[in-house]
Every structure is written in C-alpha cells, then in structure tokens.
Image (spheres, grey):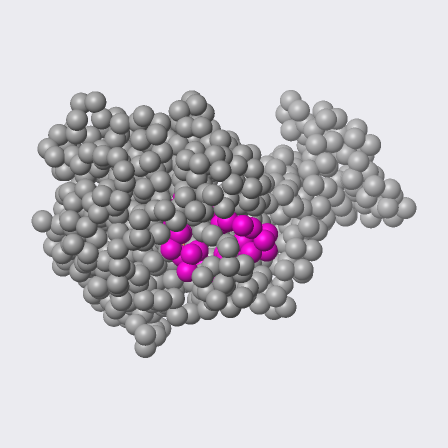
Amino acid sequence: MILRIVVGLGLTVIAFAIAGRRVWWLKRLAFSGQSAPERVAYAKEHLAGEVKTQLAEVIGQRKLLKWSVPGGAHAATFWGFIVLLLTIIESYGNLFSRTFAIPGIGHWAFIGFIEDLFAVGVLAGIVVFTVIRLRDNPRKEGRRSRFFGSHTTAAWVVLALIFLVIASLLVYRGAQQNTGVFPYPDAWAFASWVIAQALHPLGYGVNSVLEVTFILLQLAVVLAFLVVVTYSKHLHIALAPLNIMFSRRPNALGPLEPMRSKGKVLDFEEADPDTDVFGIGKIEDLTWKGMLDLGTCTECGRCQSQCPAWATGKPLSPKQVILDMRDHAFAKAPYLLASSDEAREKLPEAVKAEAERPLVGTKAGNGVIDPDVLWSCTNCGACVEECPVDIEHIDHIDGMRRHQVLIESAFPAEAAVMLKNLENKANPWGMAEGRRADWITELDFEVPVVDGKIGAGVEYLFWVGCAGALDDRARKTTRAIAELLHTAGVTFAVLGPAEACTGDPARRLGNEFVFSMLAQRNVETLNDAGVKKIVASCPHCFNTIAREYPQLGGNYEVIHHTQLLARLVEEGKLKPAGKVEEKITYHDPCFLGRHNKVYTPPRELIDAVPGTTAKEMHRCKNRGFCCGAGGARMWLEERIGKRINTERVEEALALDPDTVSTACPYCMVMLGDAVDAKKASGEAKQTLEVIDVAQLLVRSVRSGSSRAEAVSTREEDPPDPPAAGLRPAR
Ligand code: SF4
Ligand code: SF4
C-alpha cells in the first residue's frame, strides 16, 4: 500500500509541478500584453448574464452543438469528463484504502451507473472524432479539410490519452468487482461489469494486481493528460470559460471597438506614436484578452470552413491567423518575459530573430502574417459567428490593419484613392457633394432636405448613404424606398449634401483617423439637427450609425429599411397587391444578417409580394456567404483566387432564379457585376436581375401588375446620370 501511495502521490507532485510552471509562464505571457479594463468592468457589471452565458456556452455547449455530429461527440466527451471527476476522487481514495467510497454518495447505485454511462459516452465521442479526422484528413483533402493547418499529431495524442483514461478506468473497476471492493452494486456499473466478466477467469490474485496497477495507470494517464493540456491546443479546456467570460457582448460582431492604448480610448489629438499603441504592430500590442484568444483556439477549423476568402483560394484562414500569432507569441515569449536588456542579450539567436520579426510582413516575406492574408478579409464575421470559444478574429485583423495604415502607411495602393476621396469629398468616389441630392429630382414628389433642425413633424431621417445617393444601381433602391415611405404616409427628410460617408470603409480598412473625422462630422450634423430616428438603407451605414456612433456621442434609434418596410406592410400601410410571379432567392448581406441579426424582415417582404416563390441558397442566414465587398474589399482589387462574388452567384444560379434579391448596395454591386459576367458568358439567363427587396416591393405596391408590367414600370425610372469612375477597378 505504501508503494502505491508513494507512486500515486509522487506522480501527482511531478505533474502538478510541470503543469503549474507552465500555467505561471502562460499567465505571465498573457499579461505581457496591454491592459483591457473595459472587459473586466463589463464582466463585473453583468455577472448574472455571464453566469447564464457560461451555462449556455460552456455547460450547454450551445455553439458546438450547431454542428450536430462533432458537437454531439464533443458534448459527450466534455460532460463525460465532468462526471468522471468523481472517478478521479475514487482513484485517489483507493490509493489509501481499497474499499474507499465517496462520503455520502459513494455507494449509490445511480452514481455507479452514471459514471459508466458517461465513460461509454466518452468512448463513443472519441470514436466519432477518430472517424471525422480520418475522413476529413488534410493530407487527402488539402485546403478543403477544416483541419488543414492544425496540429493534427497533438490531436491524435490527446485522443489516445482520452482512450487510455477510459480504458484503464473500466479495467480497474472491473477488477474491483472481481475482488469484492467495488463500492457500487456491480450490475449498475454495466460497462465495468462486462469487463469484470472477461477478467473473472483470471482469479482473485491476478485481479488484485490488475486493480492496483490500473488505478495507478489511470492516475498516470490523467496526470499526463493534465501536462499535455497545458502544452497543447487542449489548453482550451481551461481557457475557454475565461475567454467566453471576457468576450465582447453580445459577440465580437457589429461594431469595431475604438482604438485603445494602455487601457484608454486613444485621443488622436494627444496620442504619441512613440509611446502609445496604435493598433496591433507587435504581438505585445495585443491586450491580455487578445493573448487569451490565441491560447484558447481549439484548432477545430470551423472558422476556416466558413471563411469566404479561404473558400475562394485566398491565403487567409482565420484559424491560421490565430495559430501563426500564437506560435509567434510562444517563440517570442522568452524575449518578452526576460527581466532585463542584459537577459535579452543572452537569449538564443533564434529567439532574438523571432523578436525582430515583424508581425505583418512585407511582400518580401519574413512577417508572421502575410499582407495578402491581412487584406483578404471581408470582415464578413463568419469566423466569429462559428467560433465555439468566442475568438475575436476581426478585432485582430482590423487591429493589425490599423497599425499598417496609421503607422506603416502600408496598404493596397488602390485604397489610397478611396481614402483621399473620403477626406476631400466625404464619399469614396470623390464625387461632388452636391450630387448627393440628384436622386430627389428624379421623383415626382417632394423630399425635404434638412436645413438646420429636422422638422417637428418629421418622423425619420432617411440616411441615404454614399452608394444610395451616387451609385446607379443603389439609386434605384433609394428611389424605391422613398416612394414606399411616401406611399405609406411616413414623414421623412434627408440630409442631402450635408450627409457624409459614415466612415465605415475607412474604419474597416484601418484608417481610424479618417473614420473619426467623418463620424464626428456626421454626429455633429445629426445632433445639431435634433435627429432621433434614422432609417438607413445600407447595412454598413446602419451598423456604423446604430452601433459605432454611440462611441462618439451619437445615440439614435436606427432601423434598416427592410425592418421599417416589413412593419408598414404588417400594419397595412403598404399593400403589395400586384403579382410578381418569380422565383426569388435572397442573399443575406453580412452587415445586416450576421453582424446585426436582421434575417426575417427581408424574407417577410418577399413573401408578402403575391406570386413570388422564395428559394434559399444552401449558405444562408447566419451561415450566409459574403458577396466580397465588406471590410473595405469593395475598394480593393481581388487578384488572388476565385472572385467571391462569382462563387456566390454560382450558388444562386444553381437554383435557377428569376431574381436575386438583397438589401445592401454593396451586395447589389458585387452580385450585379458577377451576374453581368455570367450573362455575357451565357451561363445566366438574360432576364436575371439583381434587385433590392425594396424594388421588388415597390413594383408590387405600385402596379399590382404582372412581371412585364412591373419591368416596364421600372424602365420608366429616369435614366441615371453618367457615373464615370464610380466603380472601383476590378
Ligand atoms: S471575417 Fe470573414 S473573410 Fe475575414 S477572416 Fe473571418 S470569415 Fe474570413
Ligand atoms: S478560432 Fe475558433 S473556430 Fe477557428 S479554429 Fe480556433 S477555436 Fe476553432
């Protein structure tokens, strides 16, 4: 007995010493990052909500279970390990007494049953994981595998360790049944009972040896697992609850956070590039929450599997961004944690070289993150939406973009024109500000332009947006919305030439300075005008005004046009009576859907139009596939891989629709361009249209007519003025 106590406790001390040292090192590394007092303050203020989140996300495995098979296997393994903590207590108790039982519950038949049930559940879980990993093998599947780029050897080691934990557990429990020291009624622990039947012929003596040996083996495997966890991706077992607790709420979609330095929002007038942190320029510019993200990644590849950039052959994988940053943080850690410059000097050359490595490389290479990776992101949010441990990929990517733009002046050349236009003309195309009101002259009713204060009887400020005012396709949507609001008797006004770009393209590109300039101007205009309620047609404007302008003191009730129109239809103020007998598929704009969870109103509008047949694309709603324009990609060339808009339109064409509808001017441009290309190549019918749902609705409300009539009604729209140079180069 003494020997097994010495071995058992000796192994425990060694394992805890190794794991503890590693945990201390990890903690020091995480806190070598910047402070994030806002995350702690939020978690403290919303403690009740945090408990609920932990119950849903960690205990309930909510996000994981969205992928039913791997999610079910993970839940079985996770819940199994919680229940099996009881068996670890029993193993330690058995070191001191063969007849040990947990005080109070240690002889309950139900506990014996539950322990075996979950042991079998864990075994089933690892069988499923094994099959998934064999079928989705990155060596065979290449980029199509979600495990491409993951550390697969470590994953196999962990699966083997989990198997050994359960196998050794069942063997020692079976042997205990044969030696008569098992604390529960034998048959209730059904899996152990089966093993006991197999071991029974070996006799009491052999079973006694097996009992002790496998108790020690089980403890050894559990302790090895503990050590492996602290050195592998399985760190997520400990870090996921923390990462989820300190994540942005409701999630890291929607607004970007303001730039912070040393825990405070950066004031551009006082900031000093030499002492302040401008975005993420080196790994230690991450906050401790950012560092926590790196350590928490499970390498599951869910984010990668949903990323439109990855799916179309670009070098960006959100998983790989996190893993590359993590590998770099670990390799640079001795440098970051060294106590003095002298200590740094004595570090191995490889560590010093890693410390010198730029976080974002140049075209010549050497960087941790390749510039083509950084600039491929559309900010679509699919990665954030999918990540089961709430990693905030967009914050990392846009944080690095901020540093590249503001400090290094390193960004795709074609974006410079857009930024200059924003600074000089307050719209990305550099068109004269007076042209913003041109569309009003094309209507046969008056639209008031705010001059000073918004009128007392005016309910909404209609935020038209740059595209809505200046882009040919989007202007048709703008006119349709105005006509529908007018028809429904909704009072509204516009800012006209006083409206400036919300700053979204600049912010998503990383130019926080230009964003602040435009946003402050707009907030001042809106506040001076006494605006309370805004209807926006562009999801990017909608997201920026509703969720980012509060960071600058702009607080308004903002609604997207599809939400308002759906309400007007429901209230009977708009009557879509005209039949439109068409097969329609709806494309979810990322900044309306995933970022702001507006999925239903656009679909309600399509359904409200008589005669329509709605067909969903395979990738829709929260799994919708980006058009390729977000994250300022609208203004950048797409030189690598397949075009994202082509991929999306091909998915739509598979349904043979008459119309592709959407609710975003960016999506209209991207999908429209791709459809035009398909028409030119004969792959799409010439009658296929890309329209906003507001255009569909106005046809029905206006005419009560057939498609032919509706089209001819649309053709009565006045011609758009020439818009040379309106489109970015593609
Ligand atoms: S935001 Fe979209 S494009 Fe960017 S990394 Fe995530 S999934 Fe990929
Ligand atoms: S970032 Fe999240 S979704 Fe992507 S691999 Fe890591 S844990 Fe999985």
Q: Main secondary structure of the magenta part?
A: helix
Task: Give the mark count.
Answer: 0
Q: Quadrant of the N terminus?
A: top right
Residue that extends furthest to the bottom in the rendered view of this protein: 364
Residue that extends furthest to the right in the rendered view of this protein: 201
The residue under the point 45% across, 28% down is 575
Image spot of residue 460 (x, y percent): 26, 30
Q: Which residues are magenta?
A: 645-673
Image spot of residue 497 (x, y percent): 16, 45
Q: Nearer the viewer, residue 153 or 709?
A: 709
For residue 650: magenta? yes
Apparent side of residue 590 relative to residue 161 in the rendered image (left or right): left
Q: Is residue 13 above or below residue 104?
A: below
Image spot of residue 349 (x, y percent): 32, 74
Q: Is residue 34 visible?
A: no
Apparent side of residue 223 relative to residue 248 in the rendered image (left or right): right
Apparent side of residue 622 relative to residue 363 in the rendered image (left or right): right
Q: Nearer the viewer, residue 672 or 244?
A: 672
Apparent side of residue 639 relative to residue 657 in the rendered image (left or right): left
The residue under the point 44% across, 66% down is 315
The residue under the point 51% across, 59% down is 686
Q: Is residue 702 above or below residue 615?
A: above
Q: Is residue 522 visible?
A: yes
The residue under the point 9% across, 49% down is 269
Quarter of the rendering containing residue 183: top right
Q: Quadrant of the C terminus?
A: bottom left
Image spot of residue 224 (x, y percent): 57, 53
Q: Nearer the viewer, residue 448 or 27?
A: 448
For residue 215: magenta? no
